[in-house]
Image: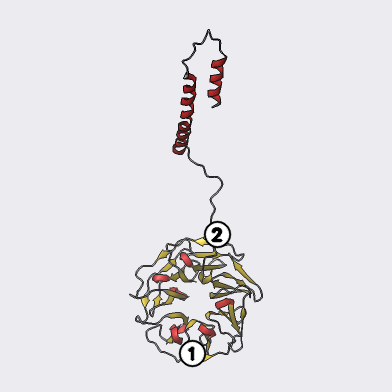
Amino acid sequence: MDRISSIAEQALASPASSISAPPQGAGNKVVKVAVSTVPWLIIGGLLWAGLFIKPQAVGGTVQPPVIERRDHFFGVAAGPAGGVWVAGSGGKIVALDGAGRAERLPTPTTQTLQDIAVWDAQHAVAVGNDGVVLVTADGGKDWKVVEGIPRSGVANKLTRVRVAAGGRAIATGEMGALLLSEDYGASWKRLRDEEDVAWNDAAMLPGGRIVVVGEFGRILLSGDGGTSWQTPASPVESSLMAVAFRDAGEGVAVGLEGMVLVTHDGGAHWTKAAVDARDHLFDIAWDEANRRWLGAGALGGWVSADAEAAAWRAGRLDERDLAWHTRVLPAGKEAWFAGASIGRWDGQRWAALGH
């Protein structure tokens, strides 16, 4: 509009002898035509900009943290190079060092992983929903899905995996899943036929002895590596969620409603321990460094006992953090707890990561 006004002013200031008088109304028409073209020029400019000017990114891409608040980690194992590995939602496997720094290991699944176990510096295995089994043979750099896992037509969640020397492993889960591998997880076979019960954990003892615990207080015992089975009497009907042994004879099983069972003969006989706990217990571990039993459960709860599993105590990691934990892993003077949150506990202070 400034340019149009300037042209009009020059025309009015010129001598009459040098400029022919325009027809009446011609000046107004020029102004109207010029003004009417301005919107089209603006629209054309915007179209040109939209077609030919590409927006440029400003700054770097924001990367989500390795451990997010929505993550749940159901399994934890000592890492082959120190620290720990945790496995959980979305197929995540995360390596944590002693300072709590996290590195996500690449995995080929988005199925939630329920547990993880490590044989040595190279070999590890993880199991999870829909019968997924992952193995690595290079220290976690590459993971692959194992094919040919025995499956049920009803349900296939694998909830726990335990490993032993020589590449042996046992995985437990829904619909009577009790699977054995003897080649670092490369292949698996059933130890028992499919049945309508969830086996929640298994312990492999010297001499081929296997102890299994599951729903409704059920216990299995094999003395020959799973060829034949016995069913020891159980003093409880609550589901047993985990079992651990400190040697060939002394063992502890824990379960729902704060149940704790103790055996002194390798799982043949069990007695109910006196524990001041009512919340669900999901895991139990033998802490060799501190010569104690340590368990984890709901509402931030823990239980602990002496080596003989005779005197039990119970408490909470932090009264302000009532998260549930499905795994506990003793690590020197501390212990890792994994579940709705993951963190370390030194007996007094609870330090959660990523929350």
User: On the picture, is 181 further left or further right than 119?
Assistant: left
Q: Image quarter for residue 338? A: bottom right
Question: Does residue 47 appear anywhere in the picture?
Answer: yes
User: On the picture, is 237 further left or further right than 322?
Assistant: left
Closer to us: 19 or 184: 19
Q: Name the amino acid, label 1.
A: Val
Q: Secondary structure at mark 2?
A: loop
Distance in Å between CA atoms under marks 2 and 1? 43 Å
Closer to us: 311 or 222: 311
Closer to us: 152 or 308: 152
Q: Residues within 10 Å of mark 2 (few under 14, many from 20)?
A: few
Question: Does residue 210 appear anywhere in the picture?
Answer: no
Q: Image quarter for residue 158? A: bottom left
Measured as percent of width and height from the top left, residue 45 is found at 47, 33
Sequence-earlier tag: 2 or 1: 2
In the picture shown, does residue 114 fall above or below 212?
A: above
Measured as percent of width and height from the top left, residue 4 is found at 53, 23
In the rendered image, which quarter contains the N terminus?
A: top right
**Residue lying at the far front of the rendered structure:** 24
Disc assigned to residue 236 = 1
Residue on which disc 2 sits:
65
User: On the picture, is 180 further left or further right than 284?
Assistant: left
Q: Residues within 10 Å of mark 1 (few under 14, many from 20)?
A: some
Q: Residue at x 48, y 37 (%)?
A: 53
Q: Residue at x 50, y 41 (%)?
A: 55
**Residue lying at the far left of the rendered structure:** 153
In the rendered image, which quarter contains the C terminus?
A: bottom right
Number of marks present in the image shown: 2
Closer to us: 32 or 298: 32
Q: Name the amino acid, label 2.
A: Pro
In the picture shown, does residue 202 fall above or below 67?
A: below
